[in-house]
Amino acid sequence: MTMKAVFPLMLLGGLTLSACTSKQETKTTTTSETQTTTTATAGNAASGGACMDRIRKDGLRVITSPDYPPYESTNEQNQIVGFDVDMVNAMAEEIGVKAEFTGQGFEGLIPSLVAGRADLIAAGLSITEERAKSVSFTDPYEKTKNVIVVGVDSDLNGPESLNGKTVGVQLGTVQADMAAEIEGADVRTFNLFSEALAALKSGQIDSMIVDAPVGNNYIKVHSDIKLAGEMDGASKALATQLECTDLVAELNAALATLQQNGELEKLHTKWFSDQAQ
């Protein structure tokens, strides 16, 4: 079963309110070759540019959870790759800084950011009001639906069919919140979405809920699973520390440029292929 999952990108004015990991730490670095200047905004002036001053000196520290292809995963060389990685590298080049990616568990991404161990989260992170209490979000870069993934021989179809069934989700994700709202569902949480997928394929759970692009990626790779219905989705954005309004302004300007010059669309074609609308 195939499903178009990524909706047309919308750049929303101003700051908006906002799922995915390897237990080992992995890194990949891209260095930009040119320095560009972005017009300062009121938020930048208010913060005194403190975050960008440090980032221009020391580089942009990016954390992600690389078990969520095509957004982020690790390749055979243990490098973090994916749509989010390419997008942030392109944005960093527009800003004129170096981006370094580190992988860790999804549930710990926001605590690590708040503790100052990173400057940016790039992990298919959905915008929620609760998260917006702890982080500042950039403008959204896409909006997706969520899908239910089941075994190829399953007769489950839609959220209502999950009453009395086991549903696998990753800890700390919007999918975990959605599953908790399904009447009669037995929700099983996993540290990694890849662990939930393994549990589904081995028959330990009846279903799992993931972002539609991730679900589509799974069924292209695994012939023993299929999609069994669609659920609501959310907009995705990058996240910074609350006080880094200057960084948010730079990122929003870079994102707008990538949207206007077609580079973001090229990245969608590269990573989502037939999934992109």
Image: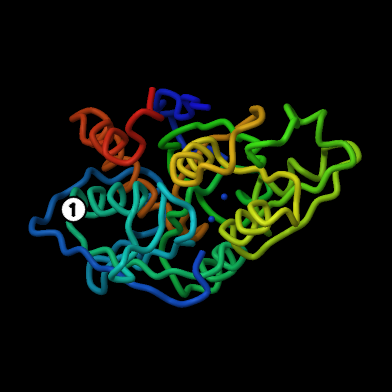
Left or right: residue 249 versus residue 56 is right
Q: Nearer the viewer, residue 272 or 217?
A: 217
Above or below, 110 against 260 in this view is: below
10 Å neighbourhood of mark 1: few (<14), some, or many (≥20)?
Answer: many
Judge from the rendering whether residue 137 lies leftward or rightward of residue 45; answer left or right: right
Total tally of numbered discs in the picture = 1
- Which quadrant would residue 184 be assigned to in this image? top right
Q: Position of residue 260 (x, y in %)?
A: 23, 28
Side (left or right) of 269 relative to 170:
left
Query: Which residue: 71% across, 44% down?
Result: 207
Instruction: Name the outermost residue toward the left.
Output: 33
- Above or below residue 47? Residue 268 is above
> Which residue is denoted by mark 1 in the rendering?
93
- Identify the residue at horizontal 68%, vertical 45% (top origin): 208
Camera sees residue 33: yes
Q: Where residue 158 sits: x, y (%)?
A: 73, 27
Res. 217 image quadrant: top left
Front residue (pair 275, 242): 275
Query: Quadrant of the image for the C terminus?
Result: top left
Q: Amino acid at mark 1?
A: Glu
Judged from the image, the secondary structure of the residue bearing numbered disc 1 is: helix
The picture places residue 42, in percent across and down from the top left corner, at 38, 44
- Colour scheme used in the picture? rainbow
Position in image of residue 120 (x %, y %) = 42, 60
Residue 54 makes an appearance in the image: no
Please state which of residues 154 and 63 is positioned toward the viewer in this rendering.
Answer: 154
Residue 269 appears left or right of 143 = left
Kindly identify the residue that appears in the image at 24 percent across and 68 percent down.
29
